[in-house]
Amino acid sequence: MFENITKSLIGAAALAVIGVTAHAADWRGWNIHVDGYPNTVAMDKFAELLADKTGGEITLQMFHGGTLGSQPDAVEQVRAGALEIGNFNLGPIGPIVAEANVVSLPFIFKDVPHMFRVLDSEGGAAIAAGMAAKGLTPLAWYDAGARSFYNGEKAINTPADVQGMKVRVMNNDLFTGMIAQLGGNPSPMAFAEVYQALKTGVVDGAENNWPSYESTGHFEVAGFYSLSQHLIIPECICVNTDAFNALSPEMQAAVSEAAQESALLQRELWAARELASREAVEAGGVVVNEIADKAPFQDAMGPVYEAYFETNPDLRPLVELIQATE
């Protein structure tokens, strides 16, 4: 009888521990993108892999389409632990994390493969450490392509073509400084407002990657797309630092592995979506132009870099490391 009571008590205790663990590991995640978008598919895959690799000890419920708020809101929710996971663009994280802001310096990356080589090396480790210190631990890097200028008036080939143009940018001093140095008028505004702003002439142009330009319908009201590729900014799967640090080393490895595998899927889907988006807008009549000489654009960014170094002198070595990475 004593043996049966003991077994019952042990079983009850085990169930109680499992119940607490399961409840504590019911994570929630944020993503701005819509159904079918490469990031959305990849984040759903991450949730599936997470449950599989942790034996169901960690589950993730994803909330897509920005249903839990804007990216700035969601960033603060993840930092505070109200959400555990977020798929974030590093652009708006820059004002919070100085190290992350380096990826928003115009023309800092030669191309997308160069960006991933940096992120997978010493430079990426420094960025990740800075983010973790602010409550956002990157688990994997997603591709967000290269951002280029588009407008409804003309092809952009030289900085002079930007002069006087009202251009929507994300809310970051580096982006507003970039447009100002090209002679334009930067107009930060929420992404959801851009289509109407372009249609009504509140702004003359904007800048973004192929899938965003196509999926939002911006190509319908801004039919000139100029391949400046001035910003190549990654996205991340970020986890609340305290939530991640509370896991065992084995669970941390499982979470990281799930994120890395989802990133491989996202990059594959992204490449296919970029091609499909470009083909779609060109079929819709968009005029696409290569910029033969980007040097004048790059040369104009000197004051933007120097202003950044004045505020962040300790990060000059990180910028130089990125630029030196082959």
Image (spheres, helix red, strand yellow):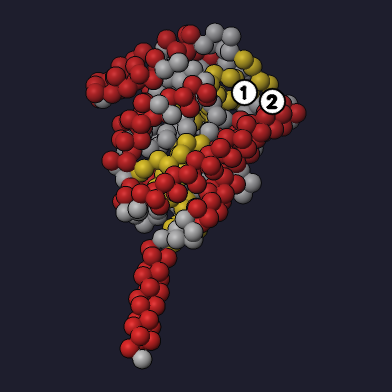
Q: Taking 10 as reference, is 325 above or below it? A: above
Q: Say whether residue 245 is left or right of residue 281.
A: left
Identify residue type, mark 1: Tyr
Instruction: Estimate the x, y position of residue 183 in percent, counting from the top left.
Output: 44, 16
Quadrant where the N terminus is found in the figure: bottom left
Q: Position of residue 201 (x, y in %)?
A: 56, 31
Q: Give the farthest residue toward the right.
A: 283
Q: Residue at image x 49%, y 59%? A: 55
- Kindly identify the residue that appears in the image at 47 percent across and 44 percent down: 257
Q: Which quarter of the figure has residue 318?
A: top left
Q: Which mark is residue 225?
A: 1
Q: Position of residue 110 (x, y in %)?
A: 49, 17
Residue at x 35% of width, y 44% of height: 136
- As shown in the figure, which amino acid type bears the numbered disc 2? Val
**Residue underneath mark 2:** 286
Q: Is residue 242 left or right of 155 when viewed as pictured?
A: left
**Side of 161 where 272 appears, left or right:** right
- Residue 88 numbered tag: none
Q: Nearer the viewer, residue 7 or 45?
A: 7
| Marked residue nearer the N-terminal end (2 or 1) | 1
Is residue 117 visible in the rendered image? The answer is yes
| Quarter placement of the C terminus | top left
How many other residues sit within 10 Å of disc 2, few (<14), some (14-19) or many (≥20)? many
Above or below: residue 145 compared with residue 155: below
Does residue 128 lie above or below 115 as drawn? below
Find out whether the residues at labels 2 and 1 contact each other: C-beta distance under 8 Å. yes
